[in-house]
Amino acid sequence: MTPDQNRETDERILEMLHESDLEDDAALAASLRDLRALGQQEAPEPSAELAALLTPGVSSLERKRWSRRHRTAVVSVAVVGAMGLGAGAVAAANPDFRDSVSKTVSVLLRPSAEQSQPPAVKAPASHEPSAIPAVPGTGSQLPVPAPTATAESRGSAAAPGAAVERPKQLPAPASPTATPTEPGKSSSVPGRIPGGDQLPAIPLPPRPSLPVVLPQPVPGGK
Amino acid sequence: MAVQLTDGELSAALAGDPSGFSAVYATTAPAVLGYFRARGADDAEALTQDVFVDILPKLGSVTGGEKGLRTFIFSVAHARLVDHHRRRERTPQLSEYDPLGDSRVSSSAEDQALESLGAGVTDMLHQLNDEQREVIVLRIVADLAIEQVAEIMGKSTGAIKQLQRRGLLALRELVTAKDYSSS
């Protein structure tokens, strides 16, 4: 160890001891000097990889190995990029291509627009049943909507709303008491009156067929 | 013996010029090797070479002159040591059973007192807290200032001062006990 290094070592150790208020401890300072000697030995002999790095003019093969390993990926990315640029240039230069693309896009968008329309048509029909339950919601006035059908065209409009469940109530109606509540709903109903009259006739046949099927398994079980 | 790094060598190394790498290795490798040995690494020389293989290609991005260079090198060494200890904790240590090396048989106070007579400074360091040991080794062996140690360990300078003070106090007790037992 050179005198300069000895002096620097002592300065560093004394600085540390002073920072910790232990500057008077000579035994501790001696131990720290021994510890300091661990970092003042010879440098280890460099390995082959390290020696190559320490030698000027010797370039690392790591970059070349990396480029060779990833050559396929780099080339494929370049080809895809070039094809994308070419397709973009063609699209920009040819107006027919743009027209065909716009038509294709419009065709693709049409079905979705059409699909959105049918629900809009059926929507009023779906609203009718909700409007009809509102009438029974008034309480025991279930028979009340039926009388409207007998009164005028409005009464027939109320029938389709309750088409599935209240075909039998049509003959029964006789109470005209519900007439004040119906006028508000009658305006939307009349257009569907005919359809509502036909629907109740259809569900009737399947009901009788069920009792016919039930008796058959009974004898079979015996 | 370690030599001083000249300004030309330092600027060449920090510019990424391989001509300055040898000087950086010659001046700093002994401290890095001493750091690994003081921390009880199994293969200190291999770790030292790994550190320089890692840092030499990156010297072009280092700023702060010689101080910044030294901080950068020991930051990498500190990270390597942490990885080394974690790896050693995970992998079981396989070795043949040696009755003479089994410390469990020497549990008497007399044997412990005899062992402490031959204990060097590194053995005493191993009885310190890990962070206290790291601070003392970085300051003494690596010759770093408190600010550099704080940067490497990711702590404040106040915390490093506190660790250093507690570590030195613990070390003083060990040194005093050793002197008392040897006298």
Image (cartoon, coloured by chain):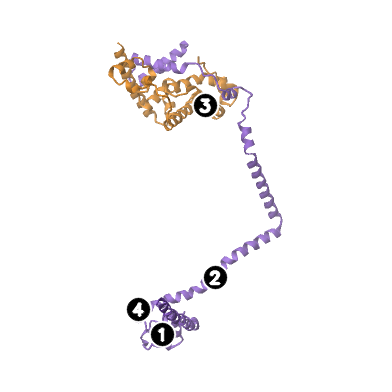
For the residue marked with disc 3, what is the amino acid?
Asp
**Chain letter belonging to callout 3:** B
CA distance separating discs 1 and 2: 34 Å
Q: Is residue A169 above or below residue B156?
A: below
Q: Which residue is depicted at the point 48% across and 28% down?
A: B76
Q: Please give the label number shown on residue A117.
A: 2
In the image, the chain rendered in orange is: B
Number of the front mark, 3 or 2: 3
Q: Which residue is mark 3?
A: B50
Q: Which quadrant of the structure image shows residue A10?
A: top left
Q: Which quadrant of the structure image shows residue B137?
A: top left
Q: Quadrant of the C terminus of chain B?
A: top left
Q: Position of residue A194 (x, y in %)?
A: 50, 84
Q: Secondary structure at mark 1?
A: loop
Q: Looking at the image, is mark 1 or mark 4 earlier in the sequence?
A: 4
Q: Is residue A37 left or right of residue A25?
A: right
For the residue marked with disc 2, what is the amino acid?
Gln
Q: Is residue A115 left or right of residue A15?
A: right
> Are discs 1 and 2 less than 8 Å apart at CB?
no
Q: Which residue is mark 4?
A: A138
CA distance separating discs 4 and 2: 34 Å
Q: Is residue A14 visible?
A: no
